[in-house]
Image (cartoon, helix red, strand yellow):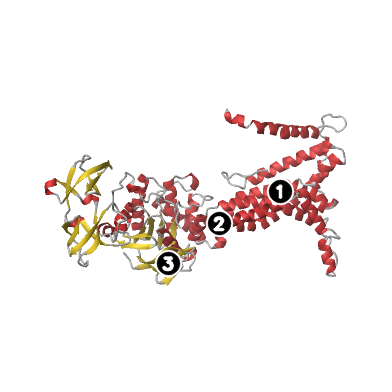
Amino acid sequence: MGKELIRLTNLTMEFDGETVLDGINLYINDHEFLTLLGPSGCGKTTTLRIIGGFLTPTAGEVRFDGQIINDLPPYRRKINTVFQRYALFPHLDVYDNIAFGLRIAKLDEVEIDRRVQEMLDIVSLRGFESRKVTQLSGGQQQRVAIARALVNRPKVLLLDEPLGALDLRLRKDMQNELKRIQQALGITFIYVTHDQEEALSMSDTIVVMDKGRIQQIGRPEDIYNEPKNAFVADFIGESNILDGVMLEDYKVEFFGRKFQCLDKGFSPREPVDVVIRPEDIDFVPPAEAHLTGTVTAITFKGMQYDIIVDFKGFKWLIQTTDHQPIGKRVGIRLNPEDIHVMKKSEYSGLFGDYSSYSAEYDEIGEEDGDEA
Amino acid sequence: MKHSRLLLPYTVWMTVFTLIPLGVVVFYAFTDSLTGAFTLANLSHLETYLPIFLRSIFLSLASSVICLLVGYPVAYTIAQTKPSRQRLLSMLLMLPMCMSFLLRTLAWVAMLEDTGILNRFISALGLKPLPLIRSNGAVILGMVYNYLPYMITPLYTVLMKIDRRLVEAAQDLGCNSRQVFTRVILPLSVPGIVSGVTMVFVPAVSTFYISQKLGSPGTTMIGDVIESQFKTAYNPNLGAALSLVMMVMIFLCIGFMNRFSDQQEEVMTP
């Protein structure tokens, strides 16, 4: 990864007195694949539009290569964008859409042709040059949008939920494709999505946002394994989140039991949130168990079963490949590495309880509305 | 089956009020005014009226172009404003249409007359009155004034529908505001331009009232000639022949203009 390319300092954005971004601080390195991840209305698209130059922040600085670019219009930034639902020019064919930026830059037609052909190869659209963009499938339009942006050889490519309109299968293919293109061309990607799985599988760095604030910045593994608060733990994958008390370093108490853990650095007897990932929990015979509970629901998910187990009235989600019948008494063991302790936050108590479990619980963030 | 039944009222309407009259016009155009026998004589007079045809086309084209030049910026500005403001502005635009066409034209007569409002004002300043009325300019002015809303409305409709994100995409790809307009907005508004020009040109080319009130014998348009054949010269056969030719001409013009607008975009024809 290269040197620092973009830096956002105390970025604040208000629309009609409503704060949409609240003090964003972030730097982005050259060649990095950075994802802004969060639910609708978290401010991720606003952040992207400020970087692209379509919005001027109410306060704060945007620096590009050290220069403040707050007021630089989009057409003078070395940044290109792949828009949500592509925004291809309907009056132009595939070739002319891709060549658009190069023609504006007044390159000679031989060079334009060379670069458009090269792009057509990269996005596998050779032979589609003279198609009207309205006659293309969603996936093909997507590729044209990427080619149209990349052909200008920007320093940074902004992608605003680019795969949102595609079906699951195509989405997976395009994820790989995008990652491949990013690595092959060595361009910085800033990617906006509400899809945590997409973010985890593609990014070098993930920025989790909510309510106009950054909740956590980190590598995908760190975000998943060491979430900073209940919001992040819940948004990135499934989590059982419990109230606990940190007794001393490496020792946490919840459900009236003491557990070994790997966390330290809390005050004595500090109240904390304890995260246990559903896939880290193993069933054991009740005799060897730390906790015992009753299976209240089971859903087949393909790769695993989602099982809801009632522990003293608090319901946990457990993901396992073993079928467990409803009503069965089951026991679980928690190893120190299965337990993750977080400081209390404004999100404590809001997430991680499966008591109102329904089969739709995993569809948060499926809406893909335009957001400010 | 069901659909064809739904079309019945329209079919009856079209037959009674369009197809049959059209047949009558064709019949008259090809018959002699005295004997009622088949003849091409009516059409052979056309040569006499060629200069008037050409003048009609010239005056209506000039009006269409002026309407476009005046109307485009207006439509563009309205399309840019907030939706609530847009409704108000487009309503204001249609407001003059609530007044009688005749009244609106007569108002211009009162303004432009040799002793009209403008000339009285000019005299009051101690200057020589200007020959404002009874000129090509006055006829064009009258047509522009009367038909401008027909230009703005289709332009506004098309401009309003242009996706904001296409503008952003163009900016993103390096366009300054002038290039955004020439490369994206203008090409995408061609269907609106074609409808607007058609909707101004067609009524303008066949008008007779405006040229009678604001024009002079030197600015007679083909509509005037047709009207006089029916009302004063009592030669409906010649009038029918001229109408027929004008109709064919209008269809050719519409066909020609529709070739400019892109395939899939539908063009309104009056």
| In this rendering, position of residue B122 left or right of residue B181 | right
Cα distance between the residues tagged 1 and 2 = 27 Å
Q: Nearer the viewer, residue B67 or B152?
A: B152
Disc 3 packing (10 Å; few <14; some 14–19; many ≥20):
many
Q: Residue beneath label 3, please?
A: A12
Foreground mark, 1 or 2? Answer: 1
Disc 2 packing (10 Å; few <14; some 14–19; many ≥20):
some
Q: Nearer the viewer, residue B248 or B5?
A: B5
| In this rendering, position of residue A362 left or right of residue B4 | left
Vertically, is A101 above or below B195? below
Cα distance between the residues tagged 3 and 2 = 34 Å
Residue B157 is situated, as x and y percent measured from the top left of the image, at 60, 50
Q: Residue beneath label 2, please?
A: B183
Q: Which of B16 and A146 is in front in this view?
A: B16
User: Does the rendering let one see residue A31?
Assistant: no
Residue A240 is situated, as x and y percent measured from the top left of the image, at 26, 53
Q: Residue beneath label 1, please?
A: B201
In the rendered structure, which amino acid carries the disc numbered 1?
Answer: Phe
Read off the chain for label 3. Answer: A
Which residue: 22% across, 43% down?
A: A295
Which residue: 20% across, 42% down?
A: A322
Q: In which quarter of the image is residue A137?
A: top left
Which residue: 38% across, 49% down?
A: A366
Foreground mark, 3 or 1? Answer: 3
* Mark 2 secondary-structure assignment: helix
Residue A156 is situated, as x and y percent measured from the top left of the image, at 40, 62
Cα distance between the residues tagged 3 and 1 = 53 Å
User: Does the rendering let one see residue A292?
Assistant: yes
Which residue: 69% across, 33% down?
A: B13
Disc 1 packing (10 Å; few <14; some 14–19; many ≥20):
many
In the rendered structure, which amino acid carries the disc numbered 2?
Answer: Arg
